[in-house]
């Protein structure tokens, strides 16, 4: 195992961390960095070595000697991505990985970062945290199955489609002149807001406040895909290309009924705000 020690910070394997973040992708890193910048002791775990301003541990969550490290924390944030989009990849990353993490890392609370795919309903009615998940495919079922490893007091952060820097698929489709018929709903959240929401939940866990069983991390617009593509084309000055029609699923529209209770609001409350910011960044020399 490979520990990285930030400057002027001594590392103790047997200390009790405020937060351990498993998975240091874009989301996990933003969460770990924000909490560290606020003065909390943070350990980030990922398979490959990386240098960060907070402490990191390079190991596989399935490593046989992970339990011997006797890692413990007040709050464990599990924010991994599957290596591949297959039933085996999802099973390993989510139910098996979360079980492995919670078995080998002693923690008071867990925040599991999941996906709105657990809601397989194709409906124009609003879906919120009070809606029972009805997964319609193996991916949604596997993600929902992972939640059974959560205990009372833990939280599943259910994110919609994350977009942001390097996550600009809709803008790229718009630049290609893509379009679709109305009636296909989509749910999105900017990576900045997804990370901010996770931090809000972690801070509540650190202050021993109760967490909801699930929180839906979406901007709450439940936009029609046709409208999203229209906006992305027009914002980039691109006309419809007839042979670039997309055929997405009917979809659903989600919003959170818990944001006010959590004291949270989105920096980018609609896809227009978020994608406009991305376009502005691209135009900046």
Image (cartoon, rainbow, N blue to C red):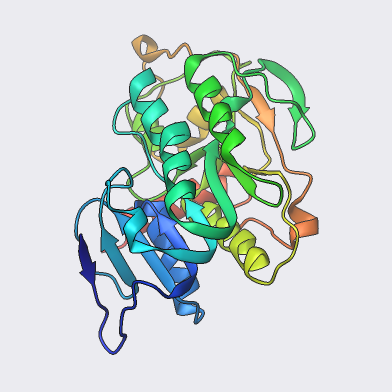
Asked if one can make out residue 283 in the rendered structure from this viewpoint, the answer is no
User: Quadrant location of residue 136?
Assistant: top right
Q: Residue shown at 63%/50% (left/top)? A: 269
Q: Residue furthest bottom?
A: 8
**Quadrant including the C terminus:** bottom left
- Asked if 80 appears above or below 206 in the picture, the reply is above
Expressed as whole percent of the image width and height from the top left, the position of residue 129 reads 75, 37
- Asked if 61 appears above or below 200 in the picture, the reply is above
Q: Residue shown at 53%/38% (left/top)? A: 114
Q: Is residue 259 left or right of residue 200?
A: right
- Asked if 218 appears above or below 267 in the picture, the reply is above
Expressed as whole percent of the image width and height from the top left, the position of residue 101 reads 43, 48
Q: Residue shown at 28%/90% (left/top)? A: 8
**Quadrant including the N terminus:** bottom left
Expressed as whole percent of the image width and height from the top left, the position of residue 144 reads 58, 28
Asked if one can make out residue 114 in the rendered structure from this viewpoint, the answer is yes
In front here: 182 or 184?
184
Expressed as whole percent of the image width and height from the top left, the position of residue 141 reads 55, 20
Could you tell me how many numbered marks the image carries?
0
In front here: 254 or 262?
262
Q: Residue shown at 56%/27% (left/top)? A: 145
- Asked if 253 appears above or below 251 in the picture, the reply is below
User: Quadrant location of residue 193?
Assistant: bottom right
In front here: 99 or 275?
99
């Amino acid at each position: 195992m490979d520990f990285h020690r930030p400057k002027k910070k001594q590392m103790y394997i047997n200390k009790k961390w405020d937060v351990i973040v498993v998975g240091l992708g874009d989301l996990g890193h933003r969460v770990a960095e924000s909490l560290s910048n606020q003065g909390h002791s943070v350990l980030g775990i990922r398979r490959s070595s990386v240098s960060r301003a907070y402490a990191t541990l390079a190991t596989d969550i399935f490593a046989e000697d992970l339990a011997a490290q006797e890692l413990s924390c007040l709050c464990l944030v599990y924010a991994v991505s599957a290596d591949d989009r297959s039933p085996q990849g999802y099973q390993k990353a989510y139910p098996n990985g979360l079980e492995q993490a919670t078995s080998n890392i002693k923690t008071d609370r867990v925040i599991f970062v999941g996906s709105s795919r657990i809601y397989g309903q194709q409906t124009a009615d609003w879906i919120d945290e009070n809606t029972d998940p009805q997964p319609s495919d193996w991916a949604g079922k596997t993600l929902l199955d992972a939640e059974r490893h959560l205990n009372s007091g833990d939280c599943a952060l259910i994110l919609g489609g994350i977009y942001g820097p390097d996550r600009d698929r809709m803008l790229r489709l718009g630049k290609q002149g893509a379009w679709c018929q109305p009636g296909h709903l989509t749910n999105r959240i900017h990576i900045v807001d997804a990370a901010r929401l996770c931090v809000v939940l972690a801070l509540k866990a650190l202050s021993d406040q109760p967490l909801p069983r699930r929180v839906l991390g979406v901007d709450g617009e439940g936009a029609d895909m046709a409208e999203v593509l229209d906006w992305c084309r027009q914002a980039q000055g691109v006309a419809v290309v007839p042979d670039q029609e997309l055929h997405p699923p009917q979809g659903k529209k989600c919003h959170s009924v818990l944001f006010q209770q959590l004291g949270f609001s989105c920096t980018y409350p609609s896809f227009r705000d978020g994608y406009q910011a991305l376009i502005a960044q691209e135009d900046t020399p």
